[in-house]
Image (spheres, grey):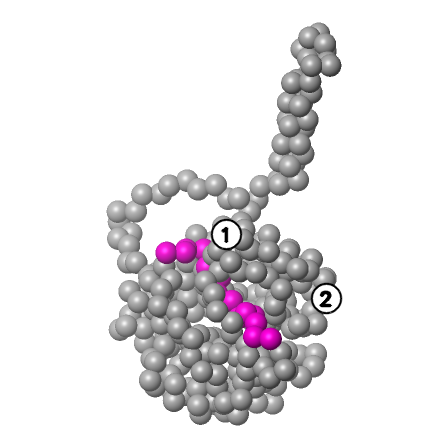
């Protein structure tokens, strides 16, 4: 089954909702993910409604700007669809939204993040900790969209590298079994170098295809990203459960210490200056 998505940083959604609605009529996505919605409590869902979609939103409470939302189709390829928002306890400067979705009983975890460029190290650590916690025991497909504002990360294949501690910590998180699929610059602002800020992160590399970059909404400086994922229907009566190690719960500090000790012992064993009797005690 093909599932279609649209994602963008709208830089204020309320004044671009008509343009987004027209794009939705043409593209017919099943899910629409938007960052920097800049919505407030006083703006009701009815003012940003898109026909035949439900909306889940998370506004930034402390100051203006930020905010994220996800539109969910009411009809997915004639299959019943249900959803449930997950509690993240993440209500600070960084917004994180996680939604458990079932499409004809096939599960999917759809997530969205907006991380401001002025986020602190503590806020960055909290975001990473929440992602680890919520994704650690998930066996279904995960799709995490967002504007992470990591301009210094190099996303060359197999050579991910960050310039700052926050970027390096995020790269370390993704190297624990995730793929990042966006390869072209997504933000273009006059006076600034083009940058790749908007990301699509998944735990199933081969289920993503046909990524396209569309023009921004209105005067937003971020492109619209269109993509398709595959959900393969499974016969639940013929499923064979295969044990899978959960690397998230590994004690990496102890593993690193053990490897260091073994390498040190190996160097000592091959040292001709150490006597045979001493080597037997290594």
Q: Identify which residue is drawn at 53% across, 60% down.
A: 155
Residue 222 x/y as whole percent: 52, 79
Residue 28's spot in the image, x, y percent?
A: 33, 80
Q: Position of residue 11 (x, y in %)?
A: 57, 83
Of mark 1 and mark 2, the one earlier in the sequence is 2
Say which of 140 and 84 sits in front: 140
Q: Label 2: few (<14), some or many (≥20) within 10 Å?
A: few
**Residue 116, quarter of the rendered image:** bottom right
Query: Circle 2 sits on which residue?
Result: 120
For the residue labelled by badge 1, is the local secondary structure a helix, a strand or a loop?
loop
Q: Is residue 9 above or below residue 249?
A: below
Q: Is residue 169 above or below residue 147?
A: above
Q: Residue 259: which disc? A: none
Q: Residue 89 versus residue 15: which sits nearer the camera?
A: 15
Q: Which segment did they paint magenta?
A: 193-206
Residue to which mark 1 is pinned: 158
Q: Is residue 245 above or below residue 204?
A: above
Location of the N terminus (image quadrant): bottom left
Quarter residue 21 falls in: bottom left
Q: Quadrant of the C terminus?
A: top right
Q: Is residue 266 above or below residue 39?
A: above
| Residue 208 visible in the displayed image | yes
Left or right: where 54 falls relative to 103: right
Q: Please rate how many residues cluster around mark 1, counting C-alpha atoms within 10 Å: few if below 14, some from 14 to 19, many from 20.
A: few
Q: Residue at x 45, y 82 (%)?
A: 215
Relative to 192, is 108 on the left or the right? left
Q: Is residue 13 inside the magenta stretch?
A: no
Location of residue 196 (image quadrant):
bottom right
Q: Residue at x 47, y 89 (%)?
A: 17
């Amino acid at each position: 089954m093909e599932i279609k998505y649209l994602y963008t940083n709208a830089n204020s959604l309320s004044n671009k909702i008509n343009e987004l609605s027209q794009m939705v009529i043409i593209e017919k996505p099943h899910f629409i993910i938007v960052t920097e919605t800049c919505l407030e409590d006083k703006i009701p869902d009815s003012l940003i409604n898109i026909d035949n979609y439900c909306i889940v939103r998370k506004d930034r409470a402390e100051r203006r700007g930020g905010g994220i939302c996800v539109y969910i189709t009411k009809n997915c390829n004639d299959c019943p669809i249900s959803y449930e928002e997950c509690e993240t306890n993440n209500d600070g400067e960084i917004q994180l939204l996680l939604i458990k979705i079932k499409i004809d009983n096939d599960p999917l975890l759809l997530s969205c993040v907006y991380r401001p460029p002025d986020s602190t190290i503590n806020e960055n650590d909290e975001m990473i900790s929440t992602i680890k916690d919520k994704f650690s025991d998930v066996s279904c497909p995960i799709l995490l969209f967002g504007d992470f504002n990591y301009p210094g990360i190099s996303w060359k294949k197999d050579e991910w590298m960050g310039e700052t501690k926050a970027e390096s910590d995020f790269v370390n998180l993704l190297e624990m079994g995730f793929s990042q699929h966006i390869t072209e610059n997504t933000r273009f602002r006059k006076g600034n170098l083009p940058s790749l800020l908007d990301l699509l992160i998944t735990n199933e590399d081969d289920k993503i295809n046909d990524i396209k970059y569309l023009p921004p909404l209105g005067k937003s400086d971020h492109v619209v990203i269109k993509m398709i994922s595959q959900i393969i229907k499974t016969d639940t009566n013929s499923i064979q459960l295969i044990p899978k190690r959960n690397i998230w719960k590994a004690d990496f500090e102890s593993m690193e210490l053990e490897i260091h000790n073994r390498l040190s012992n190996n160097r000592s064993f091959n040292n001709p200056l150490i006597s045979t009797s001493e080597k037997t005690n290594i």
